[in-house]
């Protein structure tokens, strides 16, 4: 389960960082499927929330138990 959370967190971190960069710099979106998770008109806040969620999901997989 830890590995699954780690992979999901990694994908969310990359996707939201890609969305933030594409929104501010304009251009190519690396992970286009993440845009379906963010409401239209609230991209910056939505991608920031997904970034935080990805970090929170990655924490248990980073800890050694």
Image: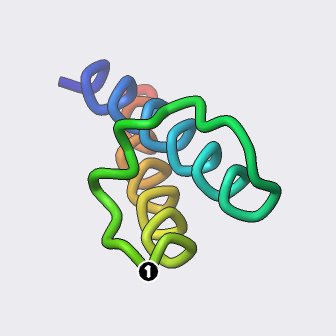
Residue displayed at 50% across by 78% down: 45
Vertical arrangement, residue 56 with respect to residue 31, above or below: below
The reply, left or right, for residue 3 in relation to residue 35 is: left
Disc 1: CA contacts within 10 A as few (<14), some (14-19) or many (>=20): few
Q: How far across and down, in percent of the image, does residue 4 sit?
A: 25, 23
Q: How many marks?
A: 1
Q: Where does residue 13 sit, x and y in percent of width and height?
A: 53, 43
Pick the front one: 65 or 2: 2
Residue appearing at x 58%, y 51% in the figure: 19
Colour pattern: rainbow
Q: 7 left or right of 18?
A: left
| Identity of the residue drawn at 49% across and 50% down | 55
Report which quarter residue 9 is drawn in: top left
Q: Quadrant of residue 49?
A: bottom left
Task: Please tell me whether residue 7 is drawn above or below residue 35 in the rendered image.
Answer: above
Q: Residue 7, how many percent across, how many down? A: 37, 24
Which residue of the protein is positioned furthest toward the top in this rendering?
A: 3
Secondary element at tag 1: loop
Depth check, front residue: 32 or 46: 32
Extreme-left residue of the structure: 1
Give coordinates of residue 53: x percent, y percent.
39, 58
Residue on which the image places disc 1: 41
Q: Quadrant where the N terminus lies?
A: top left
């Amino acid at each position: 389960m830890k590995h699954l959370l780690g992979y999901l967190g990694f994908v969310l971190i990359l996707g939201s960082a890609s969305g933030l960069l594409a929104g501010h710099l304009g251009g190519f979106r690396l992970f286009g499927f993440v845009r379906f998770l963010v409401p239209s008109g609230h991209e910056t806040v939505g991608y920031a929330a997904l970034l935080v969620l990805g970090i929170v999901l990655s924490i248990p997989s980073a800890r050694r138990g």
